[in-house]
Each structure stands twice: as C-alpha cells, then as structure tokens.
Amino acid sequence: MPEPVTATRAPDAPRPPGAPVRYADASAWLVCDLVGEALRDWPGPRDQVGVLGVSEYATGDTLRQVAVDVAKKAISPLRFVAASPGTLVGLSCLKFGLHGPSLLLTMPPADGVPVARVLAGRWLAGAAPAVLLVTHEVDRSGTHRGTCELLEAA
C-alpha cells in the first residue's frame, strides 16, 4: 500500500491555474493536491474510487468570507456553494472524475479517522475498488495541513 501523502496550503494561496471552479475554499484545493498526488501512480480505474474526508474545520475560511460579504451586501451566489463543507471532498471528485461514494466527517481527525477506516472497509467490500482517506486540519498560523492515504481491498 502506498505511503500517505501530506501537504500544506496557505489560506490566501491563489487557486491553481486552469482551475475548473472559480470559488473554492483553500481546504478544497489542498485536498485536490493531495488526491492528485495519491492517484498519480495508481493504475486502477478512477470512476468508482471513493473519497472519505475528515475535518473539523472544513470550509471555515469561505464561511467567514460569506459572512463578511453578506454584511457588505455584495456577494456572489457561487460563494455559497464554495462554503458547503462537502466541497472539501466534492471538488476532488469533480476534478479527477471520481464517482464512487464520498463523505465528509466533520470532526477532528483524531476522532474521525478510526470511524472513516471502518467505513472505508465497508466500501472496499464492494462499493469502491479504492478509497482515498483525506484528513484536514488548520494550525494556529491559519495554514491548512492535510494527508491523503489510498486504501485498497486486501
């Protein structure tokens, strides 16, 4: 089984060039980076790969920006979509053509990863050939930190 990949992203980092979505939270772009790296050498078909995310923070930066924009009475409806916590895993599914099961557990990774591993085991028993287990946290400086592990059936 491949080693988990890790990465960081500043909350104000620009979206990647050629990004398919105009508004997305820094956490979602971080997860896209992680998923892309985890899938880089995986030879299997991607269409049924599952994605399980675990993050207590999720799209918190965008949620706060929506609140600021609403107070100014100047907001794009697209910001509301980007603020959805599910965007954390959904953007990767869109970018990489992943159509397997997906779920975000909104809890600290320390509590959520054991639950996610049980769920991934169930998915690997028939619903998905592989599952990407992604964690996301934000440190005191506001830097987003994440890991992604590609899990396959034994």
Image (cartoon, rainbow, N blue to C red):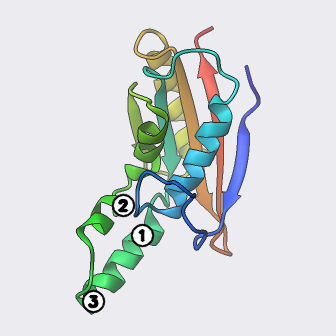
User: Which x, y percent locates residue 131?
Assistant: 53, 25
Residue shown at the point (44%, 30%) measured from the top left: 98
Residue 154 tag number: none
Residue that protrudes farthest toward the bottom in the picture: 72
User: From where the camera sits, is residue 109 visible?
Assistant: no
**Residue where numbered disc 3 is placed:** 71
Left or right: 147 as drawn, with respect to 118: right
Q: Position of residue 133 (x, y in %)?
A: 57, 34
Q: Picture coordinates of residue 86 (x, y %)? A: 37, 49
> What residue is drawn where x is 43% and y is 37%?
93
Question: Disc 1 or 2, which lies upstream in sequence?
Answer: 1
Which of disc 3 and disc 1 is earlier in sequence?
1
Few, some or many residues within 10 Å of mark 2 (<14, 14–19, 20+): many
**Amino acid under label 3?**
Ala
Local secondary structure at mark 2: helix
| Residue receiving disc 2 | 82
Near mark 3 (Cα within 10 A), the count class, few <14, some 14-19 or many ≥20, is few
For mark 1, what is the residue?
Answer: 62
* Residue type for callout 1: Thr
The kind of residue on which mark 2 rests is: Ala
Is residue 154 among the parts visible in the rendering? yes
